[in-house]
Image: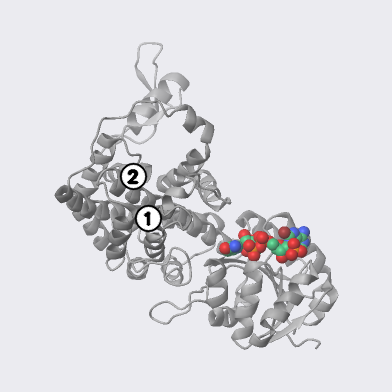
Amino acid sequence: MSNSAQIGVTGLAVMGRNLARNFARNGYTVALHNRTAARTHALVEDFGHEGDFVATETAKEFVEALERPRRLMIMVKAGEPTDAVIQEFAPLLEPGDMIIDGGNAHFEDTRRRERDLRGQGIHLVGTGVSGGEEGALNGPSIMPGGSKESYASLGPMLEKISAKAPDGSPCVTHCGPDGAGHFVKMVHNGIEYADMQLIGEAYQLLRDVAGYSPAQIADIFRTWNTGRLDSYLIEITAEVLSHVDAATGKPFVDVVQDRAEQKGTGRWTVQIALDLGVPVSGIAEAVFARSLSGHADLRAASRELVGPQAKPLGESEAAAFADRVEQALYASKIVSYTQGFHEISAGSDQYDWDIDLGAVSAIWRGGCIIRAAFLDRIRAAYDARPDLPSLLSDETFAQEIAAAQDDWREVLVAATRQGVPAPGFSAALAYYDALRADRLPAALTQGQRDFFGAHTYRRVDREGSFHTLWGGDRSEVEA
Ligand code: NBP
């Protein structure tokens, strides 16, 4: 049927297939296309009963199946495949049509593609989609960028298929022009890395310092999940930890190789943060921790390095320690989100995106991997004060960290004493202490830079730049 589909999806692997089904289940007619036509036919065969699908084989048929202005969603592997697909379809489109890239594109690629297509009057809508294949089917958190005009046409459809937050609001917002959506998705993934690392550290400490078994730790996580740490990642952590390997009868976590993989969005978050000059030390530690875990040879060569002699805690001390770990985890998590939101705010300033941080925290409350009860409170903090310089400046979060800090420090003392690496907890605490410090050793750094490179420094008591004649009589001159 020509011109009848309200949306088309090309790229029908797990994500595209499930998004297409989600649109169809919500009453939209969905045109289908995939480089390898077998996937298109398999979808119709397996799920055709779920809604109205128009299966197409060629690019021309696909484009002709769409109502105008056309909404064409690309769900292919990010990078060159996305460019290839855009090159294939763009010549067949007309001004006002929309190409929605729902893959994990780098936001700079999205900016380039948006610029290139704008000349032709085509809207490129770079859209972050989070929630994995389950979210794509039942409701993801969606982070679209692109023009306001495109959002006016597309937004209501995205709102319909998106996850709904606990208060019923759709987990989708127009993040801002060109690459804003993919930028927000990138930082979302960076925060996800940090969250997972912190949870991993909590687990390791409960195991090595407190002496709990994976099953006992699963119970502890289940309890935490009923409180302020209530989140998808804590929930699935308990599931993974309580799972027993059928082949060996051992805890599943003990039969999995301890080498974490990554696809790149965490790394991008850190690379871009470095370019923007934003300290995202928690996210960086999470990326580095995955990287270190993968260096099997280096780790094997280091097994003989000497650690401390330490015994796990006794039963009564262990329970108190677990409570402290909860405090440390919560405080470190607040710091991760503080750093992530700082990066979004810096990106928004750099690229003139005008991203609403409250709206971003609101759409992460459902559907996505980092969904968590406490995002409600982040939203409340930004809604109350959109110019909040940092989440840590919010009174409630500051009070909670103040209440947690003694335990947080104690946990790190125990980790250090027992030789359990906790780079995420430690980086978060160092960030907190550095921000609240009266004076930082940066003054000394400036002195050293002036000594070896005449880089000059500023004084605390006078305006201007100064240089000390280090190689001469050490008098000071105005630079
Ligand atoms: P993949 O990332 O595995 O990509 C497979 C799809 O890309 C297939 O439809 C394949 O067609 C198509 N494709 C490739 Br590969 N090269 C192509 C080319 N040169 N021209 C046309 N099509 C090409 O699929 P996915 O895991 O469903 O993810 C889709 C997008 O969503 C990715 O950008 C991913 O990063 C993003 N994402 C994934 C998740 C997740 O949980 N998996 C979550 C959020 C976002 P073929 O069938 O002919 O080989």
> Label 2 sits on what residue type?
Tyr
Left or right, 91 with respect to 291, comes to right
Q: Position of residue 452 (x, y in %)?
A: 45, 19
Asked if labels 2 and 1 touch by Cβ distance under 8 angstroms, the answer is: yes
Q: Which mark is residue 431?
A: 2
Image: 26 above or below 276: below
- How many residues crowd mark 2 within 10 Å: few (<14), some (14–19), many (20+)? many
- Label 2 CB sits under 8 Å from any ligand 1 atom: no
State which quarter of the image contains the N terminus: bottom right
> Label 1 sits on what residue type?
Thr
State which quarter of the image contains the C terminus: top left
Q: Ligand 1 is located in which of the four quadrants?
A: bottom right
Residue at image coords 37%, 51%: 198
Q: Which mark is residue 338?
A: 1
Q: Position of residue 199 (x, y in %)?
A: 37, 53
Camera-side residue of 124 and 222:
222
Residue at image coords 52%, 51%: 266
Residue at image coords 39%, 78%: 166
Q: Is residue 186 visible?
A: yes
The local secondary structure at tag 1 comes to helix
Left or right, 323 with respect to 465, comes to left
